[in-house]
Amino acid sequence: MKYYVAPLEGITGYVMRNVHHKYYPGADKYFIPFIEPKPKSKKIFTGRELRDILPENNRGVNVVPQILTNKWEDFLWTAGHLQEYGYREVNLNLGCPSKTVVSKKRGSGFLAFPEEIDEFLYNIFEKTDMQISVKTRLGKEEPEEFEELMEIYNRYPLEELIIHPRTQRQLYGGVPEYSFYGEALKKAKFPVCYNGDIKTTEDCIRICSEFPGTDAVMMGRGILRNPALICEIRGQFMDRKQLIAYHRELLEGYTGEIPGEVQVLFKMKELWCFMMDYFETTEKQAKAVMKAKNLQNYELAAMEILNDCERKEA
């Protein structure tokens, strides 16, 4: 079984990836948060995108860039530039459920147009020799849409298909549509990766047991909640000292990359939105982290939780 770290915009950038890989090795792939093609711009990549893809920022880490677009020409344009940096695999984002993305007919918003997806895939596989994987949801409105989408995917030699078994309309709510994932697994002509609601070792074991044909599992929010999750799934014990060192180096990395104390605080608090669910904290302890006005107060509050609070029961 392979384990992947999902792309979460603004969170799983190269600083987080490198620190995570150092303290919690075990992920087979890290997916770089999506890149939006800009063929009419003078800049091929934004500053953030460029820092994320530079080989020197990803040494020893297996990373796959993700592209967000509904135009095959723009996909190929971006993929070609990524190939110049040494990348051999790119991932097509058909999964993002964000309303700002969907309103532009991108991400899971593109799933409502299966004929256009078919044309899109035909052209990108005809015109590049790069390995192409797809991250998808079941459809835009109803999970039954996935039957037609799966027929389309099966026409092409995907490197793998990463399935989050929810529709765009469901966002991250409710229970994943496991039966549709199971049917897709039976029909797929390529490796399939499961994605969605993997927060604990038990969650991963359940999915792999119920769907033994699964080739890989992708985790996003579960890794942010518990950075040791993949190590624990692999049977490795990780102690509290390691988590403290991970947090300290992540803070140092953001402080060195991001100008301004307020911006660094915002980045760390964003991470704590997920990590707080990992600990048995009091309301006072949680507020001390989330309402800290400077790095000194933040570090004191964060270290109190990291040193003293027990882990929540799964």
Image (tube, rainbow, N blue to C red):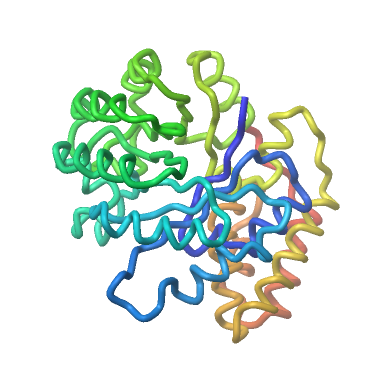
Residues 199 and 308: in front is: 199
Q: Position of residue 275 (x, y in %)?
A: 61, 53
Residues 257 and 119: in front is: 119
Q: Residue at x 47, y 25 (%)?
A: 191
Q: Residue at x 43, y 43 (%)?
A: 129
Q: Is residue 130 left or right of residue 127?
A: right
Q: Is residue 174 left or right of residue 109?
A: right
Residues 254 and 124: in front is: 124
Residue 97 vs 255, above or below: the answer is: above
Quadrant of res 186: top left
Q: Residue at x 19, y 54 (%)?
A: 105
Image quadrant where one finds the N terminus: top right
User: In the rendered image, is residue 285 in sight?
Assistant: no
Q: Position of residue 135 (x, y in %)?
A: 39, 40
Q: Give the residue furthest to the bottom.
A: 260
Residue 58 vs 137, above or below: the answer is: below
Quadrant of res 79: bottom left
